[in-house]
Amino acid sequence: MLYSGSQLLVSIEINDDWQIIGGMRSTKFSLNNSLVDSSNISSGIWRELLIGSGLRSIDITVTGSFANSEAEQKIRSLALTGKIAKFQISFASGESLISKFQIHFYERIGNMGEEEHYAIGLASSGEVQYS
């Protein structure tokens, strides 16, 4: 089943409460697994990988409009300081993930007389809970 990018909801934990950042216009979600090559002389001509090893990470890019000024201020502050915060990413399918993320880029985009939009890139830090 295909889902619209606008059906991804990003929330941030502020004062022990989840606050929606804003409406999504487009998204990119990447789950990355680094590989550990365990090939040896007995592997022959085929590569062998070490099961369950390597680093895992999630990178998420979202663009949209902020829900309110408090969410925008929190995102801007995290981007400026490089601090890590807890985010919840909810998908249209009902699945969600919760993890700490660092904002590795933050952009504000707008034309005169039009609604301002934002783009943020989130890079996971630590364990990701997926349900």
Image: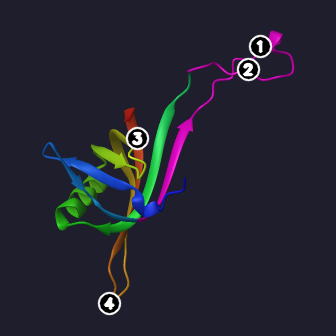
The magenta span reads 25-52
The residue lying at 28 percent from left, 45 percent from top is 83
| Disc 1 target residue | 40
| In this rendering, the label closer to the viewer, 2 or 1 | 2
| Disc 2 target residue | 48
Question: In the image, what residue type sits under mark 3?
Answer: Ser
The C terminus is located in which quarter? top left
Q: Are the two marked residues, 2 and 1, in contact with CB atoms closer than 8 angstroms? A: yes
Residue 51 left/right relative to 99: right
Q: Are the two marked residues, 4 and 3, in contact with CB atoms closer than 8 angstroms? A: no
Residue 52 left/right relative to 96: right
Q: Around disc 1, counting alpha carbons within 10 Å, would you say few (fewer than 14), some (14 to 19), or many (20 or more)? A: few
| Disc 3 target residue | 124
The residue lying at 69 percent from left, 17 percent from top is 38
| In this rendering, the label closer to the viewer, 1 or 4 | 4
Q: Are the two marked residues, 3 and 2, in contact with CB atoms closer than 8 angstroms? A: no
